Image: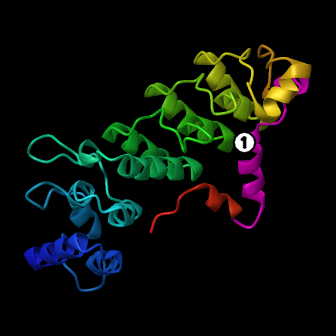
Amino acid sequence: MLQELCDNIRTAIEHGRTDIIRSLLEACDGEGTDPIVTREYILNNPLMEDGTFLYMATKLNQGDVVRTLLSCGADPGIQNTQGLNAIDVATSEHMRQIYVDELLRATANSEVGRVCQLVAAGININSWDSVESKNTPLHWAACYGNKEIVTCLISRGADVNSMNACGATPLHDAVIGTDDGVVQELLQAGANPLIQANKGVLFLLSEVGGSIPAYMGSAEDVYNQTSIGICSFGTSRKADQKGNGAQKDKIRRVA
């Protein structure tokens, strides 16, 4: 039965049939099925000659299938007998971005365990969400105000002074969110409060108000002492959170 299931999933991957893949995986956890051959078992064990199904789909450059497998819980860090995982064969820019998008999705949804898992698998922790905006996962984490994820990213090498396309840093996002814990975490990790935006809304504000002042007590203190109280990216994300799930439009949703 396991061999037949694996053959069916492999064929579905080769033909890009995400609907069949989802159905087969869902059936694994249905009533009367083998308690050992669960969806998690199928996804996160190297059952193919090359490795996991995610490894196979990535190697074949089947983007929609990769998104589907990731959304079902596939761990890209599972290695094959050669010590390679799915990230190692994500050679195209398109495929690498799919993995970055999954990291951003997990960050936005405060999935600390998933974020740590994806970073450990080898996803570039300082990747951009897009060339146009150049926000890193740390920008996202600071905006959404999740201290655990901020800590996770920093401890794994995230650049606390990374600047997006407008020159804004994660600290700008944390300040506009007035999150005391996140602001403290960033500053203690070396975030520079004197960095100014170089274009956009933040740049215009910095022209009249200067840079973010040194941290004096709470995030609210920083917010009140600086005229850079608007983060172009952060504002849009926060607004999205308040508006009928529009925040989902900021993330390339999985298939």
Q: Residue at x 70, y 32 (%)?
A: 166
Q: Residue at x 28, y 58 (%)?
A: 61
Image location (x, y in percent) of residue 8: 17, 78
Image location (x, y in percent) of residue 133: 62, 41
Image location (x, y in percent) of residue 54: 26, 58
Asked if residue 202 lies left or right of residue 114, the reply is: right
Taking 196 as reference, is 244 above or below it? below
Instruction: Give the extent of the magenta segment.
Output: 221-245
Q: Look at label 1 and name its amino acid.
A: Gly
Who is closer to the viewer here, 143 or 95?
95
Q: Residue at x 42, y 40 (%)?
A: 116
Q: Residue at x 82, y 35 (%)?
A: 201
- The quadrant of the image that shows the N terminus is bottom left
Can residue 72 be seen by looking at this rendering? no
Asked if residue 184 lies left or right of residue 212, the reply is: left
Taking 53 as reference, is 198 above or below it? above
Can residue 122 be seen by looking at this rendering? yes
